[in-house]
Image (tube, grey):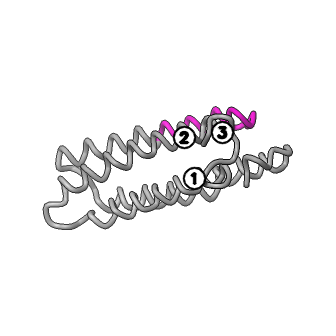
Amino acid sequence: MDGNGQKDECGTLRGVIDQEHKALEALIAKVQGICGQPDAELGLMHALTDMYLYAKAHFFDEEWLMERLGYPERVGHAARHREFLERTHDLADACLDGRLDYSELAVFLSDWLARHVEGEDARIMAYARQTGQEQYAG
């Protein structure tokens, strides 16, 4: 994004957010693919760390967009971002301690992605369209 919410090389700001969602999906799939493999802890720690850092950057972009739009649910939405980051951090700690439940991790990640992207993030774009800010919604 160009800092002014204008179109960039991805076409629209929504294009940027969509690309970030796809990258998060790929990172989550990587984490899920590692789960349950023998000696998975090291690879899983790297994958969880990558996912955490990427999610943090993505959330920054998304929260900037919500602020720019004047999105009325931005405070609660940002709180759910922090909850995701805290939960991911806790899961990484559990991995380090050897107490990670792989199925819990897989379910948490897939449920969160579907619920957040398809539900909550879709409402941001709908709000942009409803308020005549289509340049942000693509």
Residue 28, image x, y percentages = 40, 59
> What residue type is disc 2 on?
Arg
User: Which residue is depicted at the point 25% across and 55% down?
Assistant: 44
Question: What is the C-alpha distance between the residues marked 2 and 3?
Answer: 16 Å
Q: Main secondary structure of the magenta part?
A: helix
Q: Which residues are magenta?
A: 66-83
**Lower sequence index among marks 2 and 3:** 3
Crowding around mark 2 (Cα neighbors within 10 Å: few <14, some 14 to 19, many 20+) is some
> Which residue is the site of mark 2?
80
Question: What is the C-alpha distance between the residues marked 1 and 2?
Answer: 9 Å
> Which residue is the site of mark 1?
116
**Element under disc 1:** helix
Crowding around mark 3 (Cα neighbors within 10 Å: few <14, some 14 to 19, many 20+) is many
**Element under disc 3:** helix
Q: Quadrant of the N terminus?
A: top right
User: Which residue is depicted at the point 25% across and 50% down?
Assistant: 46
Magenta span contains residue 95: no
Query: Based on the displayed image, in which of its 4 quarters is residue 132 positioned?
Result: top right
**Element under disc 2:** helix
Q: Quadrant of the C terminus?
A: bottom right
Asked whether disc 1 touches disc 2, contact meaning CB atoms under 8 Å apart, the reply is yes
> What residue type is disc 3 on?
Leu
Residue 89, image x, y percentages = 34, 40
User: Which numbered dot is residue 65?
Assistant: 3
Asked whether disc 2 touches disc 3, contact meaning CB atoms under 8 Å apart, the reply is no
User: Which residue is depicted at the point 43% across and 40% down?
Assistant: 85
> What residue type is disc 1 on?
His
